Image (cartoon, rainbow, N blue to C red):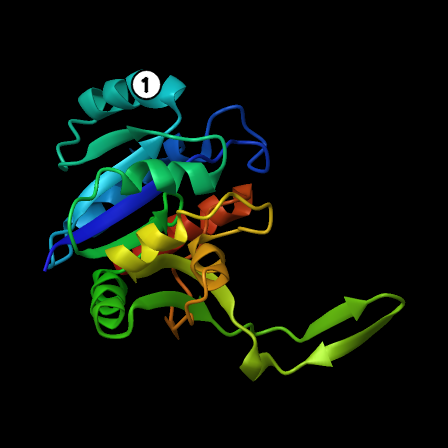
Amino acid sequence: MKYYAIIVAGGSGTRMQTTQAKQFLLLEGLPILMHTLKAFHDCILMPQILLVLNIHQHQYWEELCTKYNFTVPHEVIKGGQERFHSVKNALKMIKGNGIVAVHDAVRPLISAALIEKSFHAAAEKGNAVAGIHPTDSVRIAENSSNRTLNRDLVYLIQTPQTFQSAQLKKAYQQPFRNEYTDDASVVGHAGYEINIIEGERDNLKITYPLDLTFASILMKKGS
């Protein structure tokens, strides 16, 4: 079985309050993106890594790889206008059948165990989307009223989101829609049932400055 990892790195620094794209910020002395690629490279299944970057960041990424002597094998692919188009560009590079994991570049603490579990679950069920239950109470506002939701029935969706390649490619033949917030929404809209697997609390998405602090603490703890 052939395995692939599409790493989507289209984020900006807006919510991080920085002009630098989030994936290039330093985490324990190394750009976040490098930690993420290394996590997939270290997986026992050895997925082929496809990194999707804005075309204007390709040269800068090459310079960073040289500066930090980063040698993890990967192929850099031109990003699209939206995440949807970036993933679609990467899928063009995948020939034949396989299992494809799509992962946020700014989730550098993903474990080898979750990566492997995602690949195996997708191979068995067609897809596997990581998610965790919220610890806070959840309410939904509808018109002028709101109500409590059962936390046991609610998932906070993470990545990796992993699919059999034929399923993912078929789903991405659909036209782009604004409600496509992730790959699961694209595949679900194509009529496939989405299978949720248990994610990890440490698999945080670095979005705000405090997230970077948390990630540093967790990484030191893990090492």
Residue 106 percent location from the top left of the image:
40, 44
The residue indicated by pointer 1 is: 60
Q: Nearer the viewer, residue 132 or 97?
A: 97
Residue at horizontal 24 percent and vertical 20 percent from the top: 62
Decide if residue 200 is in sight here.
no
The disc labelled 1 sits on which kind of residue? Tyr
Taking 196 as reference, is 189 left or right? right
Q: Considering the image in quadrants, where does the C terminus appear?
A: bottom left
Which type of secondary structure does the marked residue at label 1 adopt?
helix
Q: Considering the image in quadrants, where does the N terminus appear?
A: bottom left
The 10 Å Cα crowd at callout 1, few under 14, some 14 to 19, many 20 or more, is few
Residue at horizontal 39 percent and vertical 66 percent from the top: 130
**Quarter location, residue 171:** bottom left
**Quarter location, residue 162:** bottom left
Residue 209 percent location from the top left of the image:
54, 41
Taking 98 as reference, is 164 left or right? right
Residue 70 percent location from the top left of the image:
17, 31
Residue at horizontal 28 percent and vertical 74 percent from the top: 125
**Quarter location, residue 22:** top left
Q: In this view, does 156 lie above or below 19?
A: below
Residue 37 percent location from the top left of the image:
24, 43
